[in-house]
Amino acid sequence: MRTKTYLFSLIAIFCFCIPINASAPAVAKAVSEIGTKAAAADKIVAANSTTPETSQEKIVEPRTESVQDTFIDFLESTGFANMNWGTLFMLFIACVLLYLAIVKKFEPLLLLPIAFGMLLSNIPGGELYHPDIFADGKVHWDLFRDGAGLFDYLYLGVKLEIYPCLIFIGVGAMTDFGPMIASPKSLILGAAAQLGVFVAFILAAGLEFTLQQSASIGIIGGADGPTAIFLTSKLAPELLGPIAIAAYSYMALVPVIQPPIMRLLTTKKERGIRMKQMRPVSRTEKIVFPIFASVLISFLLPPATPLIGCLMLGNLMKETGVVDRLSKAAQNELMNIVTIFLGLTVGATATATSFLNLQTIEIMLLGVLAFAFGTAGGVLLAKFMNLFTKEKMNPLIGSAGVSAVPMAARVSQVVGQEADPCNYLLMHAMGPNVAGVIGTAVAAGLMLTMLG
């Protein structure tokens, strides 16, 4: 210690304290004084300390144990230490969905937030979402107050049925019912596409689900996420997580699920049928329709009023043109914000503990079958109607009767152009597509009336 002090003092003297023209005696005197002071300091330290070796052991050893404990605690608190095979599998599924959204561009507006919410909620120790708070289909407010995470707060919008209605306002503001008004028979195609809802309902009841649970599973076939959430939160809230995941995931995968079924049930000649241009629809018709539809459907099926009312409100704001600012807000800011919140919270429910079980696998399989039968129902009814009409319709537009707006209509256009690149079916397919939105809401209202 004395040597180090001496050296540092010597350097300090040469650097700061000694003038350039200082004489050698002055330097020697300064160095001698510093050395004397360093020796005195060493004596004081030696006098105050007991056995140095014992003292060092007492000081260093506890510090070593403390560092080790801290490091071990840190390792045990990381997500890597709490990883298991279920978590790894869910992270893998999330990455697959991200790949489909980013690389394959399968409805990224839906799939990307769902996949990322799934990714975050399955990171051990993240504490973003707590399934126990929403166990048994109820909000346990005592647990909520104790330590809710970010996704727990956002998920209240799902549990309290806020997001579905807000989404429907945005959907209505972006929807043009003109093609359906111009071709009323598209309403029949939209109704036929609800075949998948009732087929899945029957199959689910056969698998020993309750009637309420079966109805909630069946509504997946309508390809309408907000309606599925709305109905499930009322009839079978304990299944809300897997049903919401199935509904939104399959909505995003419409371009994958539908085309093989459409090609299987139609010939190339049928897929190449060209349809005449539809008649123009007046502004008055477009304004009267949402008012008339809201009143009629709400009186027939009161439980469907929240969904139908919000859908028609958004459409009325768009068609009147007198609240353009509100219409644009519903189409853009409102729709985008709610889509982010809804996607994240739906994805967050797909945790390993709640997702990796036989019941969830059954729901996912029934959801695929519901989509398949819904697609098939619309196509087959269109082919049947062609037997009795002079003006043939392209049966591909029947597949758009599932209410995945506008994805299903775009799929009809893409598959149709495979047979005839100059065939444009998009506007014709939009009629059954928007009719499917109404049809799914009506089906949900019917199930609520009978089983609620």
Image (spheres, rainbow, N blue to C red):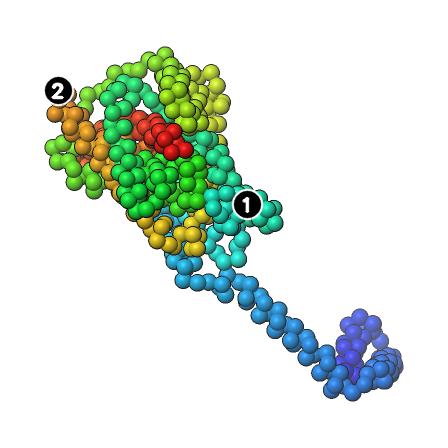
Q: Where is residue 302 in the image (x, y as percent from the top left)?
A: 41, 24
> Residue at label 2?
390
Per the image, label 1 sits on a secondary structure element best described as loop
The answer to whether marks 1 and 2 mark residues whose Cβ atoms lie closer than 8 Å is no
Q: In this view, does 212 lie above or below 332?
A: below
Q: Which residue is drawn at 32% across and 46% down?
A: 208
Q: Is residue 24 visible?
A: no
Q: In which quarter of the image is residue 285?
A: top left
Residue depicted at 31% across the width and 43% down the height: 204
Q: Residue at x 26, y 38 (%)?
A: 199
Where is 34 relative to 251, above or below?
Answer: below
Front residue (pair 87, 357): 357
Which residue is at the front of the view, 305 or 402? 305
Residue 266, given in percent of the width and then of the height, sits at: 15, 36
Residue 140 disc label: 1
Label located before the other in sequence (1 or 2) = 1
Residue 200's place in the image compared with 146, above or below, is above
Q: Position of residue 359 (x, y in %)?
A: 36, 50
Q: Which residue is drawn at 53% across and 43% down?
A: 139
Left or right: 404, with 148 as reference point: left
Q: Determine whether 128 is above or below 280 in the image.
A: below
Q: Using residue 149 as the reference point, say whether residue 136 is left or right of it.
A: left
Query: Disc 2 marks which amino acid?
Result: Lys
